[in-house]
Image (cartoon, grey):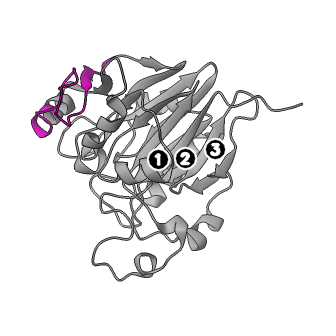
Amino acid sequence: MQPSPPMFDLRFLGTGWSHGVPMLACDCPVCLGNHPRNRRRRPSLQVLAGGMTAVIDTGPDFRDQALTFGITRLDAVFMTHEHADHVMGLDDVRRFTWARTEPLPIYADPVTLERLRIVYPYVSEVRIPGKAVPKIRFVPWESPVEVAGVRYSRLDVPHADNLPCCGVLLERGEVRVAYIPDCNDLPGPVKDRIRDADVLILNALRHRPHPAHLTLERSLELLKELNPRRGYITHMGCDFDYPALNPGLPEGIEMAYDGLRIGVSSSLRHAGQRV
């Protein structure tokens, strides 16, 4: 039987921690090496469906990500939380907004939206002649949002500083994908929503414990417990050397890397290729 065509595609635009990899002023073998899958921009995920594109988080590397991976349109942006490695590329969406008749929607929780208004006080919902400003609209993300047939739901998770933070549950038909780039644990209700997902993407910052993130060991424990058809780790620091670590991961679990594209369908529910 021929596999169904993808219901939507995912592309990892960035898979690194807040420093990126290589990290500045680091002389570890991963940072000094040149393996392409050890180059990790700040975390971001592109979702492609029905000719439309949404992006989860626009960190400081967003311009480079858009150029490298050929992003030519943008229909929605979802912000997981207010930390700099997830929001400080928002100004670069302005090139995508100028040709739009409607402002580009930016979805986030009210606390994150208020911080974005402080950081980007010049954004506008209309095009201002002579002003190079993003034409965007801040929208409270309190209930599921649908873009090109894909439903985006918040997965509220603990992270740091008692600030709101979320992962994202993507659903279309019977397909479920959970993307959780930042958390230090998964609450029971979130586990129940993502158990047996088609794809589960979790952060794994490093080997040593960190107050705001999962370790690799804990991330692998959660992936085993939650039993996705396919698991990926992201938001990784320079502890992790792709050619050394990835082959030894449990079956069905991989290190994500910048540029990895996954087509998710209802029959053959996962397939990966480098683009």
Local crowd size for mark 1, using a 10 Å CA cut-off: few (<14), some (14–19), many (≥20): many
Q: Do the residues bearing badges 2 and 1 touch, measured as CB atoms within 8 Å?
A: yes
Residue range of the region highlighted in magenta in the rendering: 117-142
Q: Is residue 238 visible?
A: yes
Work out how far the residue at label 2 is from the one at label 3, CA to CA, in angstroms. 9 Å
Secondary structure at numbered mark 1: strand
Left or right? Give the position of 169 relative to 87. Answer: right
Residue for badge 3 = 230
Q: Please state the horizontal and vertical placement of residue 53, each as a whole percent of the image.
A: 48, 31
First in sequence, mark 2 or 3: give its number.
Answer: 2
Q: Is residue 54 above or below residue 251?
A: above
Label tally: 3
Local crowd size for mark 2, using a 10 Å CA cut-off: few (<14), some (14–19), many (≥20): many
Work out how far the residue at label 2 is from the one at label 1, CA to CA, in angstroms. 8 Å
First in sequence, mark 2 or 1: give its number.
Answer: 1
Residue for badge 2 = 223
